[in-house]
Amino acid sequence: MSSPRTVIRGGLVVTASDEVHADVLVEEGRIAAVAASDSSAARSWTDAEVIDATGKYVIPGGVDAHTHMELPFGGTFASDTFETGTRAAAWGGTTTIVDFAVQSVGQSLRAGLDAWHAKADGRCAVDYGFHMIVSDVTDPVLKEMDILVEEGVTSFKLFMAYPGVFYSDDGRILRAMQRASGNGGLIMMHAENGIAIDVLVQQALAAGKTDPRYHGEVRHALLEAEATHRAIQLARVAGAPLYVVHVSAEQAVAELAAARDMDLPVFGETCPQYLFLSTDNLAEPDFEGAKYVCSTPLRPSEHQAALWRALRTNDLQVVSTDHCPFCFAGQKELGRGDFSKIPNGLPGVENRMDLLHQAVVDGHLTRRRWIEIACAAPARMFGLYPRKGTLAPGADADVVIYDPHAEQVVSARTHHMNVDYSAYEGRRLTGRVETVLSRGVTVVDRGEYTGRAGHGHYVPRGLSSYLA
Ligand code: URP
Ligand code: ZN
Ligand code: ZN
Ligand code: ZN
């Protein structure tokens, strides 16, 4: 447990803006001070419990702005509950998640949000906020959006995909964007042309193409790029900012880059699965490819260079997981003989910080850019900064002591997510989370879980400061 004062001594403090050998003083759950390790200020902190971080990085806790605990999808539910999923997040050095509450068609936003609060309340290991999935854009729902923004649900996800489930047509999307332009909310877009994709799905199935790899073929990269382009134009017409989720196609990245070159407030996220996995995984034999079915789909590995480049040039700002696990046994298997019945989503909330550290080791990212895309940018984008996403006086003491030299092999046998496979099984990574503090409380202590369900609090969010 945390003492009233804790000092993390001797580490390399890495934030999005700085790397300094510094000590971090934690008081009452917040960062009280950061001072050079050899300074008289740091030496004066003598009455505190000491965590030795010599040879380690001291970084802000990760902010995963895209998770789906317990999401109902395809006749089943994502297999991580808020309890198991946030515990796995803590193990992986993520101390804040922003999950998606869902409005069902015919329901109010309030009813959906209340239902998600009931799932999460008292169960989370780390702090959490909510975005709202808007499935039914009506006049009363548009008014509710204003109220939710006031209450700290400041972002709304709309879908150009999944007709008959979450899908909104262009008119509904435009109206929601106009509302966001008035109330300061941020529209998040699932940009895939779902109407065209559904035609290709039916044609593929009719031709006997039922294996998981056809999921990738029918969800064509050009249909992601087309929807991304259309979403950008609709947002321009509405005068609203736009955040495109789970970008995977290089042609979609090009649309975002072109918009940003025009100085438009257009932002994008990608996910580890698009950076580290490919259609080769979707093509694995014996239905193993089902483990890698998500939307947008995995792309041929040639797309990865564009994603890495965009993360360096800031044409993509955020890496979130889109954590939406389904067990292979009993859940992914629902789609044997029909890829369109495979529940969409991959596990990853526990792996994101480590995979992105590996990208530092491999030379794709600098250390500071790692912290920017995994901590600071998502916090700014979703109104959590500087309380989350950095290590500065006054911030919540969400801190990870990270061992950059430890070696690990990712495996479902050792992970903590409630899912029977790992998308990264057998992958060797350099770097590992050692100790994790959430609001000053040690929740992971050198390989031991010391947190508890209910420690995590709901965090109402402000408006996006990325737009300021
Ligand atoms: O395949 C995915 N991404 N499942 C989760 C729902 C979504 O579209 O984000
Ligand atoms: Zn304590
Ligand atoms: Zn989506
Ligand atoms: Zn998602």
Image (spheres, rainbow, N blue to C red):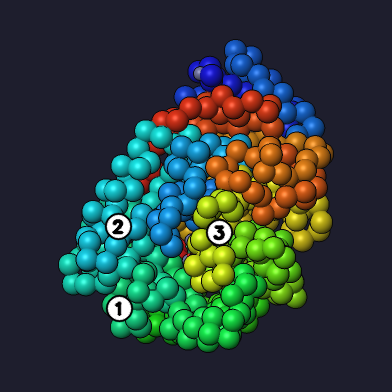
Q: Earlier in the sequence, mark 2 or mark 1?
A: 2
**Vertical relation: 411 (above or below) 330:** above
Gap between marks 2 and 3 measured at Cα: 39 Å
Q: Please report contact status of discs 2 and 3: CB closer than 8 Å, yes or no.
A: no
In this figure, which residue is indicated by the disc labeled 1? 172
Q: Where the C terminus falls, by quadrant?
A: bottom left
Query: x, y percentage for residue 39?
Result: 71, 27
Describe residue 3's horizontal placement relative to residue 289 as left or right.
left
Evaluate whether residue 25 shows in this view. Answer: no
Q: Residues within 10 Å of mark 1 (few under 14, many from 20)?
A: some
- The image quarter containing residue 295 is bottom right
Left or right: 311, with 322 as reference point: right
Give the CA distance from mark 2 to mark 1: 19 Å
Query: Is 127 on the left-hand or right-hand side of 306?
Result: left
Residue type at the position of mark 2: Val
| Proximity of marks 1 and 3: CB atoms separated by less than 8 Å | no
Three-letter residue code for mark 3: Glu
Residue carrying label 3 = 333
Under circle 3, the secondary element is helix
Task: In this rendered view, identify the residue nearer to me: 462 or 25.
Answer: 462
For marks 2 and 3, give the one nearer the viewer.
Answer: 3
Residue drawn 30% across the image and 60% down it: 103
Going from N to C along the chain, the mark reached first, 2 or 3, is 2
Residue at the image point whose x is 35% and y is 74% from the top: 164
Residue that mark 2 sits on: 149
Can you give x and y, in whole percent of width and height, for residue 97 in the image?
48, 47
* Front of the two marks 2 and 1: 1
Answer above or below: position of 423 versus 185: above
- Going from N to C along the chain, the mark reached first, 1 or 3, is 1
SS of the residue under disc 1: helix
